[in-house]
Amino acid sequence: MDRLHGKNFIAGELRAGEQTFHAIAPASGEDMDPPFAVASPDDVADACKEAASAQPRFGNTSLARRAHFLRTVADKIDALGDTLTARAMAESGLPEARLQGERGRTVGQLRLFADVVERGDWQRVRIDHADPERTPPKPDLRLRMIPLGPVAVFGASNFPLAFSVAGGDTASAFAAGCCVVVKGHPAHPGTSELVAGAITDAVAECGLPGGVFSLLNGTENTLGEALVKDPDIAAVGFTGSRSGGLALMEHAASRPVPIPVYAEMSSVNPVVLLPARLEQDAEDLAAAYVGSLSLGAGQFCTNPGIVLGIEGKALDRFIDAASSAVEEVAAQTMLTSGIKRSFDAGIARLSAQNGVAVEGQGRDGVPTCAQAQIYSANGREFMANPHLAEEVFGPASIIVRCADMDELVSILCGMEGQLTATMQMSEADYERASALLPILEQLAGRIIANGWPTGVDVAHAMVHGGPFPATSDSRTTSVGTMAIERFLRPVCYQDMPQELLPEAVRNEGTGSARLVDGAVEIK
Amino acid sequence: MDRLHGKNFIAGELRAGEQTFHAIAPASGEDMDPPFAVASPDDVADACKEAASAQPRFGNTSLARRAHFLRTVADKIDALGDTLTARAMAESGLPEARLQGERGRTVGQLRLFADVVERGDWQRVRIDHADPERTPPKPDLRLRMIPLGPVAVFGASNFPLAFSVAGGDTASAFAAGCCVVVKGHPAHPGTSELVAGAITDAVAECGLPGGVFSLLNGTENTLGEALVKDPDIAAVGFTGSRSGGLALMEHAASRPVPIPVYAEMSSVNPVVLLPARLEQDAEDLAAAYVGSLSLGAGQFCTNPGIVLGIEGKALDRFIDAASSAVEEVAAQTMLTSGIKRSFDAGIARLSAQNGVAVEGQGRDGVPTCAQAQIYSANGREFMANPHLAEEVFGPASIIVRCADMDELVSILCGMEGQLTATMQMSEADYERASALLPILEQLAGRIIANGWPTGVDVAHAMVHGGPFPATSDSRTTSVGTMAIERFLRPVCYQDMPQELLPEAVRNEGTGSARLVDGAVEIK
């Protein structure tokens, strides 16, 4: 393993820069070596131009070849071994087991997308045969999905592997046949460099043009703005703060040619404790709640930030048990000093609100660590004060004592869009759960029964999305195989001779299923 | 048939208004009776509130019931008979046969969407079964598409039936389970009223809540703005001018909760005459070209506004034949005086450009009629002057004499996004066509071989969409059954007990096909 070089990756070329920045070790607050080059406006333009130039070739790779590329990226990341997890640990403050798991998730999703690419159903082939006898004559029409074009991907700080350089956005964009320009997160530039090296090697080994992938580093928002506004970029994938996502949406909408932005922003992931289940399992629920809320220092988009129950003895038991459990939660290093400052400001704001009580706190630690927090408020206070429903990114959560189910329903109906909504229920709660379900469908992209929202399986049926402001586009998911659809658009071929048609839409075709004259056919 | 009442339809209630406007007969320029009420801001808010209130019930209708509703709407429109075509003729100036055909298309697409609803594939059900043995345990995940919520539909002037009150946007929104609030086009308020009455009757007859449908009339842009900005509206469907579409996109993006806008705006639909075909069929191509360009007074989004060929004798033959043919084209009444003014301004602008020659003109008529126009320019002039590629809505088209294939390709690569791109070719052109195809895929949503772009079949594989500014969202189509997807979003159910799951995602399920553990299954 060579030492890190600190350069940007422009279509396979390593480029130094005049300005540099350092990663900061979250545990110590100290600068880490080496210095990393800040990408210049020319670097951005060159990366995007190379992506556009590589796009026709990459977008028309065969299914087998594109799948092979995705698997090669996964193999190269696997081959980085402990070097990768060691650097990611140092840059993120996350523990080794978590990062090993995250590496597995990262290569797993690349390989899952390789399978999806090969199966070919994502091409969504539709064929309507001609009918020359009809008045007017019916033409032969064939539809397939094609890649949108080069995608700008913004690495997220809280998943330095699974939602960063070779994370879900990159994997799904590659699967769709889109070249990718990553704006690396400045919290983990060394991790980014290692992964970018793996992708760059895979691009070369697979004989693909260098413009398939670039990585640009920097610390200022102007870099992201330039990337989103570059005329060669066709779509944006982002996971991060609400303010960051909103800024990218504005940049994208203000372009001469507006482009889609898939921003996954903020969510407090309400959990409803239904009465029979709460009565039965208050203590077990409390233990699981504290586990979910403090996992990874609470730095998950699906952290259970709000718990709703009907006031009474069972909810008191839950609160007591949660308060005791949270006291055992060790202080954990947060990802960055900025996130720690926001967390401190968030809990200071929350605890200063009228009617908010501190129910329990985790162990205190050094200033870089987050101390877990559990608050409570009653339903009336909660509804009256929108601050109580704002996301505090980190291990903080508020338990809302609702007067009755009507108040609980009113609170859910008044909430902003969410990634997830959860119901804890036993069979005696099914009638209430059934009445809540349509409300939760309106509220969130994923509805969980008797689980906790943290833990987002990479699967075919996963939705990691939801109404604004959980995401900028509720019609999509950023986790799971349906994520590929974000980067595709339909094209129809009318009366095109067989020999000119793309392979997917010929009579023999590719892909395991297609819609022929309105009926699904499996091959 | 009762006389027209001139009122707005607010969730089944007929409401008069203080201000009124009249339809203007395009042929005579005279006001038509009755006066139509201008919807007030309260009318907008009430219609949207009723739509939101009806949404949960309508969105959860069974597939059979929703299909029955769509067929009932079609039947009620059929039952309007000649009253409808007579009023539409008077308001639009379009001929009877065209409007009878358009009525057939309108009820046909409602019935096609009924079939699609019943088949249920649009729910896109995905099921991933649980695996408790996996580390971590794999949950049971089930995905289906649900309606986005109430949709604002803007009626288009050029299809007073097929893209207006019960047109493609309304049919696909209803099929998706979305309530609809239509902003009627002021050019044909009587036609709108008749169709709105049919829908309102169908809503009542099917026992659905009145909020499923409302129609608001008015002449000012403020009405559309209020509708798009109403918090209860979840998506927008629009067909019209570029400036109109851009304004709606801005309104939608500036909302506290931004919503998707599906605007179909402007397109010049380039047609490439490949050399061998042109040599072989110059005269026949010219006749078909003039037919396509003058159809319906050229008032189609897919009008062939630009024809590209390689300069030489064959292209001269084509131009001569087209010039002769266009002289036989009768002057046709345009839809509105505003459209006629824009057409006159557009042809005045075009003919004043350097290097643009008038090659032929149709017959002249009364001032409300459009005189068909064919221009020519060489490739160099065309590339140097962006005005030559601007849409002139109406029967006007420009033939571009390219120096060679390289220049022709450069022109295509420099064009804005289009609804369609066409190649006229014979077998000797296949190599050139094959090289052009990837360029045309980038340019347009539909690629036509040996046809003309006018005539958009309502089919499963149709794409009436394309890169900006042809539409605001190239990921979709506004014609054909895939249009339903514009108004849907995915929801995932995790570990939800069978008895609580919506019918579509239960083990027995609904819909003819679904993705189970990654493989398509047909039922």
Image (cartoon, coloured by chain):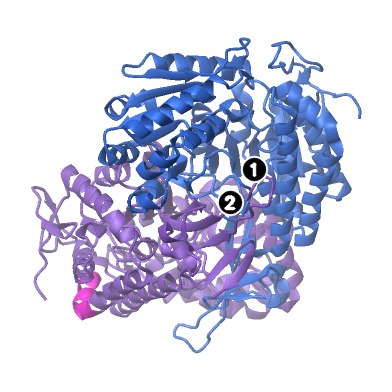
Chain colours: A blue, B purple
Q: Quadrant of the N terminus of chain B?
A: bottom left
Mark 1 residue type: Asp
Q: Which amino acid type is marked by label 2?
A: Pro
Sort mark 2 into few (<14), some (14-19) or many (20+) by Cα contacts within 10 Å.
many
Residue B517 position, x and y percent, is 63, 61
Q: Which residues are magenta?
A: B79-90
Quadrant in which the C terminus of chain B is drawn: bottom right
Q: CA distance from mark 1 to mark 2?
A: 23 Å
**Of labels 1 and 2, the one closer to you:** 2
Residue drawn at x 61%, y 16% is A369
Total count of labels: 2
The quarter holding residue B205 reads bottom left
> Which chain does the residue under circle 2 lie in?
B
- Majority secondary structure in the magenta region: helix
**Vertical placement of residue A361 versus B445, above or below:** above
Residue B302 seen in the current view: no
At x 45%, y 82%, the residue is A136
Q: Nearer the viewer, residue B341 or A303?
A: A303
Q: Residue B295's image quarter? A: bottom left
Residue found farthest to the bottom = A133
Q: Which mark is residue B139?
A: 2
- Label 1: how many residues lie within 10 Å, few (<14), some (14-19) or many (20+)? many
Along the line of sight, the residue nearer the viewer: A443 or B395 = A443
Say which residue label 1 marks.
Answer: A169
Q: Is residue B85 magenta?
A: yes
Give whichever of A482, B197 is nearer the camera: A482
Q: Is B180 rendered above or below residue A236?
A: below
Residue name at image x 29 percent, y 24 percent: A381
Local secondary structure at mark 1? helix
Residue A153 in the figure: left or right of residue B344 = right
Q: Position of residue B92 (x, y in %)?
A: 27, 67
Q: Judge by depth and name the residue closer to the eye, B238 or B348.
A: B238
